[in-house]
Amino acid sequence: MVRLFSCVSVLALVMGASFAAETQPPAKGEASAASKKVDIGTQAPEFKIKDASGKEIDLAELTAKGPVLVRLTCGCSGCDKELAYFQEIHEAYKGKGLTSLAIFREPDAKVATYVQEKKLNMLYAVDSKGDAWKVFETKTMPTNFLIEKGGKIVSVAAGCDTSGLLAKKLSEKVAKTVDAEAVDVQKKVVDANNAKK
């Protein structure tokens, strides 16, 4: 009987703690899962940022023309290794109307050097304060948002994957969005790297 009472007491404590954790309001500036507005199936947020030349990039204008892949990223070693896959995605689908927008969270001077070194071939901007991460309701770096023409979010891919598998899966989703055959960007990058050896 004592053992049964102990088990019931422990279960009640665990259930109470679990319920309390679920009902806690989100921390200031953080959206709860239920109130998250930036997610698959929702309209992309209003978002404007200036590129390196000072020209305004308006996400609504971009999505009015075609699908957009927004990549919130940095120049860390993981994001750096992943960049080749995203440049391949851009090259594979830009002719089908895809616009790729990389937003870096580093100082302008560092990004300018990085862009030259990497021969970045897509639209990019710098957001050293991290405002884009707040607008898109994410803290994960990198996070990729695939937005179809008209502005609905069709995919959110968060986290760094230097193997290229995440980019390959995202490439397949882009292909569906632009009604094209999927390009295996993972294989293309691996083959290009092997050819350099």
Image: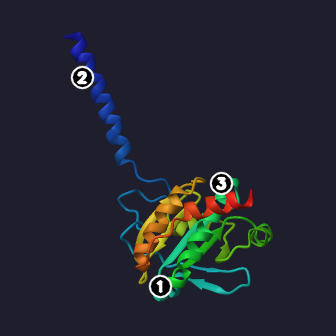
The x and y percentages for residue 59 are 53, 81
Q: Amino acid at mark 3?
A: Gly
Q: How many marks?
A: 3
Q: Does residue 38 show up?
A: no
For residue 130, the mark is none
Answer left or right for 94 relative to 36: right
Q: Does residue 11 sit above or below 163 in this rendering?
A: above
Residue under label 2: 8
The picture places residue 42, in percent across and down from the top left corner, at: 38, 72
Whether residue 81 can be seen here: yes
The tag earlier along the polypeptide, 3 or 1, is 1
Question: What numbered label is drawn on residue 66?
Answer: 1
Query: What residue lies at 55% left-to-right and 56% top-to-bottom?
Result: 140
Counting residues from the start of the chain, the first of labels 1 and 2 encountered is: 2
Q: Are marks 1 and 2 in contact (CB under 8 Å)?
A: no
Give the Cα separation between the discs numbered 3 and 1. 29 Å
Q: Nearer the viewer, mark 1 or mark 2?
A: 1
